Image: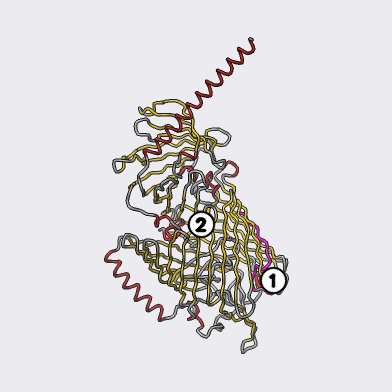
Amino acid sequence: MTKKTQHPTMFCLLAGHFFISLFWLSTVQANELEVRGNFEIQGRFFYEDALTKSQHDQQLSVAAAPEFFWSWNNDNDSLEFVPSARADQYDSERTHFDIREFSWVHVGHDWETRIGIRREFWGVTEFQHLVDIINQSDSVEDVDNEDKLGQPMLNLSLVKVWGIIDIYLLPYFRERTFAGNEGRPGIPFVNTNNVLYESKDKEKHLDLALRWSHTINDLDFALSWFEGTSRDPNLIPSFTNQGLFQLNPYYAQIKQLGIELQASLESSLLKLEVIHNENSQQDYWALQGGFEFSQYGILESNADLGWLVEFAWDERGKDSRSNFQNDLFFGNRLALNDIQSTEVLFGLSYDLDFSSTSVLLEASRRFGDNIKVSLDARFFESKEIQDPLYFFRRDDHIQLTAQYYY
Amino acid sequence: MKLIKYAMLFITLTTSSTSFAEEAEDKGLKIAQETKAIDLGWKDSSAVLEMILKNKHGETSTRNMRMKSIEQKGDGDKSLNIFDSPRDVKGTAFLSFSHPVANDEQWLYLPALKRVKRISSRNKSGSFMGSEFSFEDLTSFEVDKYTYKYLRDELVNGENCWVVIQYPIDKYSGYKKRIVWIDQSEHRIRKTDFYDRKDSLLKTLTMSDFHHINKAFWRPQILSMVNHQSGKSTVLNFSHYVLSTGLDEKDFNQNALKRAR
């Protein structure tokens, strides 16, 4: 466990005390205690020479994520605890521990409070999650940033006839994780021991978020507002005392408006996410939109085939730090709907500014009742140094993961 | 003159066959209305169920889930299904608002990603979690979803049944028609034959082990679906089937979907 991923002691103590009291309460009235989770073993295999000598061609790791769940008061109160840990053969940054969930949920008639460490997803698109902002990405888990770190929060959710309103107070900021010197794929120059903040409160800045979401027949939509520390760091180049090149994460203060729209139109889902980001350097708009077309029961079987097309645009253009400033995406999702739940996902992104390509292939299948095996492959093709993808140009790899669920 | 006579005869014949068809349609509709009316007022339901999938080689795999529903006055029901096994999909939940004429609204919750995904309303012909049940087989029965034609009376396991054809109105239904056997004593659906879009027999659903819950509503505890074309089958075994337990709207919104366990 690195220093970076630790929660502040005070918060842990307070939260710990709070949950111990709750736990005592729950042992008296508990009507349900549930334990489940998974172990995994993963291998990554690279077949091009690494960018730096410190990186390796093969990398093994093991991970575990148990889940503890209590409920009482007729399921109107519940407590969830999900720690998660990974040990990596080489990468000391990827060897890390996190608390994904440690929260108490209370359900009232038309409201709900959620207090503690949680993960919360916002958004509708598939290839990029622009609007999603509550949680920090756990980038050492996977470069797709789908894995998220637990975020301490106070969340009040109100259910009205005209939609659901969520109000969040986010009292502590989580830094993004980055692969270390020996980690791959990764940017081996990021120094997470020297992190810069715009706010003098640094990671203790109190962030606020609001979201209104609603469904009217075939249309889902949401409006959101976030004010606080950007989850997406600017990587500032500098040199260490020894004269080595490094990148220091800089976390700016931002205000971000988010818009989500999704329309279910016959066999298609039309999806759009738009953000407007206000910051002290350059305000900008960005969008991600497209459609998902589904075919059910193809070739006279139970299999479903989905076709995904999306487009990404960022007002900052080539200067954008984003990987997806003017990109096209194409994907296929095949679900065989067999007993083993075999699924294959193919995705391709093409950068119209830098002519770079990245390809993704994910296949998974269950063996027996408890084992799931996934085979992921990623290919990166980039020739221009200004392209953020350039760092990954030698990191094509195949990843094999076996998970045991209990 | 002869020609006119034949024409007259033809008209008489066609009108009488039309009125016969109308009679069959009216009778079919009336049976459907009665079946629906008898089953009104159960308020809400919850049940535990086991889903046994069997492939054509006879290999089986079992899935466990819980199912909750709430009755809606003048609209289709709302339901929430939560998966308990296989372990890797545990916590996956499916929320559905069914409507008589408008598109059903459906969302899937994926616990690993903490993500609610909308399911396109056309998926009704798609397989429900790898089973031989499609999504539309599991939505609530609404009179306005079909047009009807009464066929005949037939004895099934000693029960006198009406045999009625139901033609789905929705062009995205996976079926050209369904033939249902409804018993005349209690209006329970005993058997359904599903015909695909090419009008060939696709599946047969048999319902059995009926319980008279709260001494008011009949519910089958075993639903067996056989796919004649693929040789695969799925059996649903219900247990702990209870009605009118006091579930309310708050148990059927997107917040409820996210906290489903």
| Identity, as a three-letter code, of the amino acid under mark 2 | Thr
Which residue reaches farthest left?
Answer: A28
* Image height of A240 relative to A346, above or below: below
Residue A28's quadrant in the figure? bottom left
Cα–Cα gap, marks 2 and 1? 33 Å
Asked if disc 2 and disc 1 are in contact, CB closer than 8 Å, the reply is no
Q: Kindly report which numbered mark, 2 or 1, lies closer to the viewer in this rendering.
A: 2
Q: Give the range drawn in magenta.
A: A321-332
Quickly name the residue at label 2: A215
Residue lying at the far bottom in this picture: please name it.
A241
Q: Name the residue under label 1.
A: A317
- Of the pair A148 and A315, the residue shown nearer to us: A315
Which chain is mark 1 on? A
Residue at figure coordinates x 57%, y 57% from the top left = A262
Provide residue A314's location: percent of width, then percent of height. 66, 69
Instruction: Determine which quarter of the picture holds residue B34.
Output: top left
In the displayed structure, does residue A111 sit left or right of residue A309?
Answer: left
Tell me the residue at 48%/66% (across/down): A120
Q: Quadrant of the C terminus of chain A?
A: bottom left
Residue A342 lies, in percent from the top left, at: 54, 52
Looking at the image, residue A59 lies above or below residue B206: below
Res. A404 mark: none
Where on the picture, by quarter, is residue A76?
bottom left
Circle 2 Cα neighbour tier, 10 Å, few/some/many (<14 / 14–19 / ≥20): some
Is A23 included in the stretch rendered in magenta? no
Between A70 and B176, the one nearer to me in the picture? B176
Decide if residue B164 is in sight here. yes
Residue A399, image x, y percentages? 58, 63
Q: Give the mark nearer the N terminus: 2 vs 1.
A: 2
